[in-house]
């Protein structure tokens, strides 16, 4: 027959086994968490680098578009000025005649 002492010894052995398993599980969980944290940091860094590169690319593209629009405005503005100058020069004689009529009536 198994004595009370033997039963208690078996219980202690089982508790020790379970404690070892629990400690192993805790260690594995901590290692998994540490790896996940490292992976998360690496993913964040990579996302930051990719985001910065994408933002710089977008900025370059938009600056090119804006520069082209500004140049188009300048060139169309120059054309407008040329047209207005030509109209003014064509009408200069008429304008001078009107001013003379107003200032020095006959």
Image (cartoon, grey):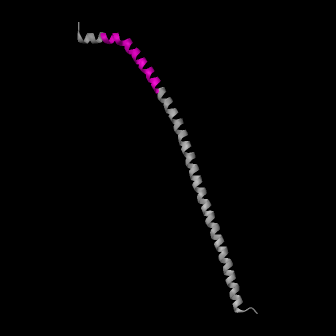
Residue that appears at 31% across and 11% down: 96
Q: Residue furthest top?
A: 106
Q: Quadrant of residue 13?
A: bottom right
Please give the range of residues in magenta. Answer: 73-96
Left or right: where does residue 27 sit relative to residue 63?
A: right
Residue 6, given in percent of the width and then of the height, sits at 71, 89
Does the magenta segment cover residue 65?
no
Q: Nearer the viewer, residue 4 or 55?
A: 4
In the rendered view of the protein, which quadrant contains the N terminus?
Answer: bottom right
Name which residue lies at 68% across and 88% down. 8
Q: Which residue lies furthest to the right in this view?
A: 1
Check the image and report above or below for 66 versus 25.
above
At x 67%, y 83%, the residue is 12
Identify which residue, 87 or 85, lies in the foreground.
85
Q: Relative to 31, is 102 on the left or the right?
A: left
- Residue closer to the observer: 60 or 85: 60
Q: In this view, does 89 lie above or below 2?
A: above
Along the horizontal axis of the image, is 101 left or right of 25? left
Residue at 66% over, 75% down: 20
Q: Is residue 77 above or below residue 27?
A: above
User: In which quadrant of the rendered image does the C terminus lie?
Assistant: top left
């Amino acid at each position: 027959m198994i004595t009370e002492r033997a039963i208690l010894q078996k219980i202690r052995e089982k508790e020790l086994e379970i404690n070892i398993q629990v400690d192993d599980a805790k260690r594995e969980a901590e290692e998994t968490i540490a790896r996940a944290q490292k992976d998360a940091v690496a993913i964040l860094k990579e996302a930051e680098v990719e985001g910065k590169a994408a933002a710089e690319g977008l900025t370059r593209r938009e600056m090119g578009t804006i520069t082209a629009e500004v140049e188009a405005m300048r060139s169309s503005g120059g054309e407008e000025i040329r047209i207005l100058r030509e109209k003014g020069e064509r009408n200069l004689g008429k304008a001078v005649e009107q001013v003379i009529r107003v200032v020095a009536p006959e």
